[in-house]
Image (cartoon, rainbow, N blue to C red):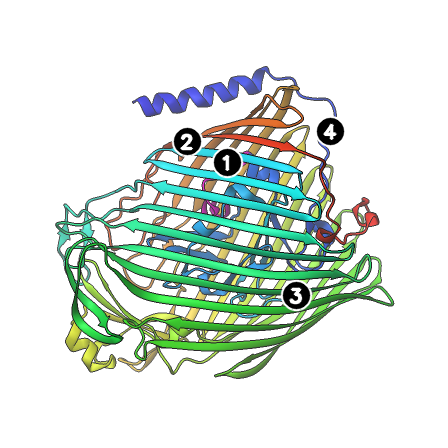
Amino acid sequence: MRKRLLIVSVTLCALTMTASAQVVSDKEVTLDEVVVTGTGTEHLLKNAPVQTEVISGKQLRNYGARSIEDILGMLSASFDFNQSDMGSRMQINGLGNSYILILIDGRRIHGDNGGDNDLGLIDPQNIDHIEIVKGASSALYGSDAIAGVVNIITKKHNDGILVENSTRVGSYGDVRQHNGLGLTIGKLQSFTNFQWQHNDGWQNTSVEDIHQTEFLITDSRNKTANRHTNWQIAERLTYQATKKLQIYADGSFYWKRIFRPSGKYASTDVHTFDLMYRNVSAGGGARLNLSKTDYITLDVSWDRHAYYYLFTDTTLTDGYYKGKFTHYYPYFPTQQLLQSDQQRTIAEVKGVFTLPCNNRLSVGMEYRYDWLKAPARVVDGKADASHEAIYVQDEFDFIPWLNISAGLRLNHNNMFGYRLTPKLSAMLRTGERLRWRATWSQGFKVPTTKEMYYRYVRSMIGTYLYLGNTDLKPQSSNYFSLGGEYNANGLSVTLTAYHNRVDNMITLVTIPNSEAPGEYIVEYDPMAVRQYRNVEDAKTVGIDFSARYRVRGFSMGVGYSYLNTRANLYNSENNTMNRVIIDGMARHKGNVFATWNHTFSSNYSLGIGLYGKMSSKRYYQINGNGKGYNIWRINTVHDFGRSKTMSYSIEAGVDNIFNYVDRTPHGLHLGTNTPGTTIYAKFTIKFSKGKKTSNKFNSNVKQSDYEED
């Protein structure tokens, strides 16, 4: 009752403030977003040859998100998430994690937890905006970009001195802490970022489904989301060596622990351990400006992701002693057992050059080395792979109303040889307000070391054996899209149709126990065996629609995504070809928002946002389908006490206003794992002093590009 009264009070307060405010007479002035992800070069969003979806800084500010999953899942209709202990199972337009490339300022994120991305590595407080490109639409990106690219652009801090603190607290012990320290000393800039996150977890149901039986447990201790804590510290140094040369170095350390329940009918009935992760990254690079438009960049990065069992009681499990693998080795409380140590090194050189006749050429070379150590999960204890690529892209502007971007990427893998992938995008202007875009691209993706060599056992109430497959073939894709965009008087409407075909798509398939290695069956006696296999072909077809309207501090918008998928899967047991739906597909998804911002005085401004997210049923081959859902949220932003050096703000809101909870039994798929209605509040204080320094290296957009058509 108290929670419902609080929700009503916050809503009435927001509506009262809205009704009593005076709207400013001047029109809201908004500059076009500058995007870089689609072509690797700067374009105004409206003029980008590759269709790009942007979640702007203003949208992020009004929304008040707790995580990147929260942002993408609510503010874009194309995304779905299934969160678990291993990370976030993301899906965009029918394809999952392994087909989505996530970048931070153009660099790959590293955190492959069992095939899932741990997006806790991303501090939402430090995001400037997000750019989303769907399909394998750019020659700049190779493996992992068949479904699309999500480029998270961080804030650029160029004050003389910057100190900021943000603390967010919410239901279920949810705490999000952010601290930033920026310093500029002569030609040297430093920014240190710290984030700490904690949640007590929650349980939406105590019912557990035991697969392949008709028995349901009604007093399970397994939680819908387990208690967890993670923190990260990151540093970036930038040195302006000369007017034309900039050098940078950065690094980070990330730690996470997931506290798993124990006791009767819990995931740790037999093996009593928590999960622990350690990520380390380091990188450096330089940019040399040859002219106002031409430059060369060099980037080198090294990332390590290590995943451990952290034992909480004496346990007999698979392990290794003096470098040799052994079964039923004893581990004691506080001891750690390495499950996987993934390391990756990437080096890339890129140049952008202006050519005669309004051509802009991008050329580059990339080297990547992946190394996996998993003594308890890989037959030989370790595996590796190397990848090289050369790419070239040319942007043609021969005709003022037509822009064409064409590219080629030559990929090479030490096990699977060479593959050439072409890309072609075009943007046509018909009048001042209407633009048409079309894209055709091919993608190429080799099996990962985990898909080929990994094997592990998942024990809940039953035992499941997961196997890699050294007979896997590389995957290739053909992506087509056609869309139109209309902009006029604060109204923006986009409609895009797409078709993505993936040949030899790799997915987990349930196989007969007789097809698994005999020693594994004898040792584990699994209820089911799942192995990575190539399906004959997979297709996704869909339509994305969005509409936004802005006027005098008020914005509203809707988004809709229709999706249909299918794949042909060979059933070796029956010697038949079965048509199946790709796991996780929801045929209909949508989102809606309305925001209002007003400045009452020099000391106070208010922002109010109402958001909704809807999804139809999600389909899966095993363990049931996920239910459709409809979730609403309200957020308020209060800025006050602003001065030349200090600023303060408070955010407060209610998530899942109508208290929707999916109580599907544990072990089956959920549509969403929200615990129901939650409340939250965030306080931010920022101190900045010193003259802001311009950074000519962050933009090469000519002033004329900002002029309205």
**Labels 3, 4: front one:** 3
> Marks 1 and 2: in contact by CB < 8 Å?
yes
Could you tell me which residue is drawn at 68 percent across and 28 percent down? 552
Disc 2 on helix, strand or loop?
Answer: strand
Amino acid carrying label 2: it is Tyr
Name the residue that disc number 4 marks: 27
- Mark sitting earlier along the chain (4/1): 4
Left or right of residue 36, residue 338 in this image: left
Would residue 214 be counted in the magenta stretch?
no
Amino acid carrying label 1: it is Gly
Q: Which mark is residue 64?
A: 1
Name the residue that disc number 2 marks: 680
Placement of 548 over or under 606, stated as above or below: below
Name the residue that disc number 3 marks: 298
Q: Is residue 569 visible?
A: no
Amino acid carrying label 3: it is Leu
- Number of numbered tags placed on the structure image: 4
- The CA span between labels 2 and 1 is 10 Å
Circle 4: is it few (<14), some (14-19), or many (20+) Cα within 10 Å?
few
- The CA span between labels 2 and 4 is 32 Å
Circle 2: is it few (<14), some (14-19), or many (20+) Cα within 10 Å?
some
- The CA span between labels 3 and 4 is 43 Å
Circle 1: is it few (<14), some (14-19), or many (20+) Cα within 10 Å?
many
Disc 4 on helix, strand or loop?
Answer: loop
- The CA span between labels 3 and 1 is 35 Å
Could you tell me which residue is drawn at 35 percent across and 45 percent down? 229
The answer to which of 174 and 470 lies nearer the viewer is 174
Which quarter of the figure has residue 296? bottom right
- The CA span between labels 3 and 2 is 42 Å
The magenta region covers: 62-74
**Labels 2, 4: front one:** 2
- Mark sitting earlier along the chain (3/1): 1
